[in-house]
Image: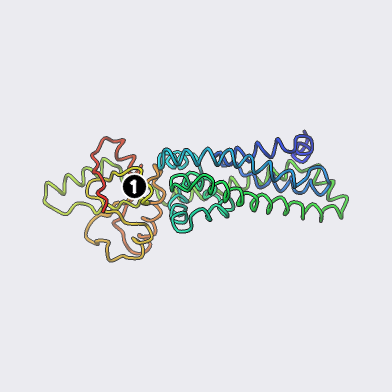
Amino acid sequence: MHSVLGLLEHHTYAVIFSWVLIEQGGLPIPSVPVMLAAGTMSAAHKLHVAYAIPVIMLACLISDSAWYFLGRTYGSKVLNVLCKFSLEAATCVDRTQGTVTKRGAITLLFAKFVPGLSTVAAPIAGQARISYKKFVAYDMAGTVLWAGAWLFAGRFFGDLARRSRDLFAALEHFGFVLVAVMVASLLMYRLLKRRQFLSELRGLRLEPAQLMAMMDDAERAGHEPPFIVDLRHPLDVLTDPLVVPGAVRIGPDELKKRREMIPIDRDIILYCTCPSEETSAKIALDLRRMGVKRVRPLRGGLQGWRDAGYPVDAVVFA
């Protein structure tokens, strides 16, 4: 095929279904450009939006249901996998967990509009024990809103383009290039954001072995040990009730709002669920900008600490 628009014309619903299924399955390949292209082609009556929406719903139902049951069964272990392979999921896990806790299934109505949140919303809904029937109802409603918005945006643009025969002919001829540029631009933007974040983080991380040495040195010298903060959401603690010895459980927002609880004469070590420690790293950077300089994220988070073979304590629930 010479263009994505031509491909859509001949294999319309298979392309839409496959692309959305792959994206919702966790690969960071944006489907928005394809939905815009599909909406544009509907202006020429080469496909029907009314048929495209159920196809997108089916793709989302399959992928989101799989993530829901994985999250329900394995909890934070599934989120760890998503953090490793997604460009944005790690930075959205804590925020999504908080939103799901406060708003419940309503979060699913807008989740697909937010990069990253779209990826982790389904497994977190399963982790939060939202009933499957309720999950499907809200997830499908959110899918209709998401798919409809982009398909009708493409249809609106297509209707405008039809007023100019030359413009519409150009769209048909260069459709592949336009969609490819949009996909590449979105991927490049996300990659650049991640690279910038990692650049800020370079040299800030603390290795598990370094933390263990600091704890041993403090014990031998009779000094106060590092102030270790467990930033994990309560949902993660319930499914994995272990902590680094001596760690205090404090939420990210509470830690930033209540600086008085942060000791200024000790090293502050933060860790979270994600093995790429993005939540703890972001909080560490925020605290440094607020003037708290002796703060570092633990490389690998709690999982990295355990993988290194160091001891953990059981969480005592009140």
In-front residue for pair 290/274? 274
Q: Secondary structure at mark 1?
A: helix
Q: Quadrant of the N terminus?
A: top right
Q: Is residue 94 left or right of residue 146?
A: left
The residue sitting at the top extreme is 1
Looking at the picture, which amino acid does disc 1 mark?
Val
Q: Is residue 301 above or below residue 109?
A: above
Depth check: 69 or 262 in front?
69
Residue 225 image position (x, y, % from top left): 19, 51
In the foreground, 17 or 171: 17
In front of the other: 204 or 86: 86
Residue 110 quadrant: bottom right
User: Residue 160: image x %, image y %?
Assistant: 81, 56
Q: Residue at x 47, y 48 (%)?
A: 130
Image colouring: rainbow
Residue 286, image x, y percentages: 39, 59
Q: Quadrant of the C terminus?
A: bottom left
Q: What residue appears at the point 45 percent right and 41 percent down from the top-left corner?
A: 71
Report whether 129 appears left or right of 317: right
Q: To which residue does mark 1 refer?
A: 237
Which residue sits at x=35%, y=57%?
251
Q: Is residue 269 above or below residue 290?
A: above
